[in-house]
Image (cartoon, rainbow, N blue to C red):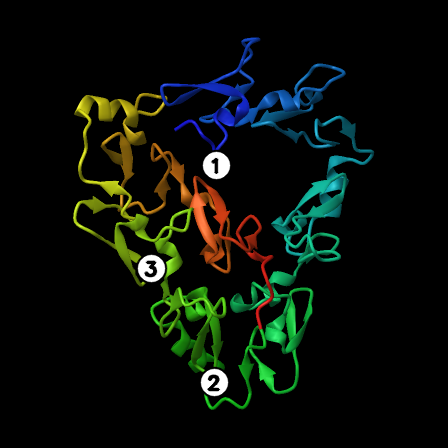
């Protein structure tokens, strides 16, 4: 219960006592904190002055957030232009600072580049106004192909080759269906083409990744990867997977059949393990069973050992949490093998034919 997502006890910055982390604060300054002692505000202390963020910013979980006119890891550098000029230079044509896709430092935008393998990545421009991800069809997330391989991407807009049309050049002009009719057939009950897991061409879905039969259905609506836990076990070994949902054996329950109905604890013992640091049972958002919190199924986005996490905080891409290529764990995406990025939107695995 004290291990963080990297399986390190109390993040190496504290000790585990009765299933809870006690953070190392020998000076009594409270700079190390968090459920797993994951926040270390000592990282914000300037070596020369001894001040947090050199007095020109605030520290949150070991990171300095600087006041206007200051920058640097510890807000140690001052800009030589006015805050007004800084804002003016970083404002994109749509009126947003760095198009909401970058950080403004002294009048220059540093874009949140999601493709570390490219020369300049998917997001670029003086104010990060160009987002090449807009040219990638959902089914092409695993490859470098832009505009479905049938066009040229110009600052996030597809210019299609002759014979192809559509926002991402995904529709052949020879198709008897219109772009709208083709999309309607591929949508099914989802608001995304092929449920965000496949290619729509002339009203037919081809599910991706290629050769992975865990994604299937007329509109790629079934994703059996959702039945697997972090170790790859299907329904915890206590059930079968049906269209992305676990059907549990007798004696087991939970979305991954991870809970046994049998329990050898007293109710008092069980409740003591379900109380969070503030003494609230399962953060008031779940029930306690055999020392473990079972979060409210009506609020699908609540998770965590004590139901303290909101998975709506996880990054999205193409309208899917973790791009459908990973699971949301306490507000952060844990990507499946071969995927990377804050929203698991970057394919780093082997090339597909």
Question: Residue 326 location, x and y as percent?
Answer: 46, 52
Q: Earlier in the sequence, mark 1 or mark 3?
A: 1
Q: Earlier in the sequence, mark 3 or mark 2?
A: 2
Residue 328 is left or right of residue 302, and the answer is right
- Which structural element holds mark 3? loop
| Rendered residue at 40%/57% (across/down) | 225
- Which structural element holds mark 2? loop
Q: Against 67, is 303 above or below?
A: below
Mark 3, residue position: 244
- Which structural element holds mark 1? loop
Mark 2, residue position: 178
Decide: marks 1, 2 in contact (CB < 8 A)?
no
Residue 248 is left or right of residue 340, and the answer is left
In three-dimensional space, the C-alpha distance between marks 1 and 3, rounded to whole angstroms, equals 24 Å
Q: Residue furthest front?
A: 237
Mark 1, residue position: 5
Residue 258 is left or right of residue 140, and the answer is left
Estimate how packed mark 1 is, as few (under 14), some (14 to 19) or many (20 or more) residues with alpha carbons within 10 Å: few
Question: Residue 47 location, x and y as percent?
Answer: 73, 18
Between disc 3 and disc 2, the foreground one is 3
Q: Quadrant of the N terminus?
A: top left
Q: Earlier in the sequence, mark 1 or mark 2?
A: 1
């Amino acid at each position: 219960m004290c291990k963080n997502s990297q399986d390190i006890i109390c993040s190496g910055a504290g000790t585990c006592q009765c299933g809870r982390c006690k953070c190392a604060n020998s000076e009594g300054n409270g700079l190390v904190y968090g459920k797993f002692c994951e926040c270390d505000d000592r990282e914000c202390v300037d070596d020369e002055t001894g001040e947090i963020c050199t007095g020109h910013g605030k520290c949150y979980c070991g990171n300095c957030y600087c006041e206007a006119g200051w920058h640097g890891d510890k807000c140690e550098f001052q800009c030589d232009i006015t805050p007004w000029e800084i804002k003016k230079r970083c404002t994109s044509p749509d009126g947003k600072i760095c198009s909401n896709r970058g950080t403004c430092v002294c009048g220059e935008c540093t874009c949140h580049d999601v493709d570390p393998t490219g020369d300049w990545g998917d997001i670029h421009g003086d104010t990060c106004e160009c987002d090449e991800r807009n040219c990638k069809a959902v089914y092409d997330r695993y490859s470098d192909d832009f505009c479905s391989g049938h066009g040229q991407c110009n600052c996030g807009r597809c210019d299609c080759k002759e014979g192809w049309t559509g926002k991402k050049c995904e529709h052949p002009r020879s198709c008897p269906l219109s772009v709208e009719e083709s999309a309607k057939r591929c949508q099914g009950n989802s608001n995304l083409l092929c449920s965000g897991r496949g290619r729509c061409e002339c009203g037919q879905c081809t599910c991706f990744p290629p050769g992975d039969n865990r994604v299937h259905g007329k509109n790629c609506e079934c994703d059996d990867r959702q039945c697997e836990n972090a170790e790859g076990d299907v329904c915890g070994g206590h059930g079968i997977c049906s269209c992305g949902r676990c059907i549990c054996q007798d004696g087991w329950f939970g979305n991954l059949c991870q809970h046994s109905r049998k329990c050898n604890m007293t109710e008092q013992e069980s409740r003591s393990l379900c109380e969070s640091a503030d003494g609230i049972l399962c953060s008031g958002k779940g029930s306690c069973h055999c020392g473990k919190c079972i979060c409210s199924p009506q609020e699908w986005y609540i998770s965590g050992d004590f139901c303290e996490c909101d998975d709506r905080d996880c990054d999205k891409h193409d309208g899917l949490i973790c791009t459908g290529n990973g699971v949301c764990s306490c507000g952060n995406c844990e990507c499946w093998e071969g995927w990377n990025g804050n929203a698991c939107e970057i394919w780093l695995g082997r090339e597909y034919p």
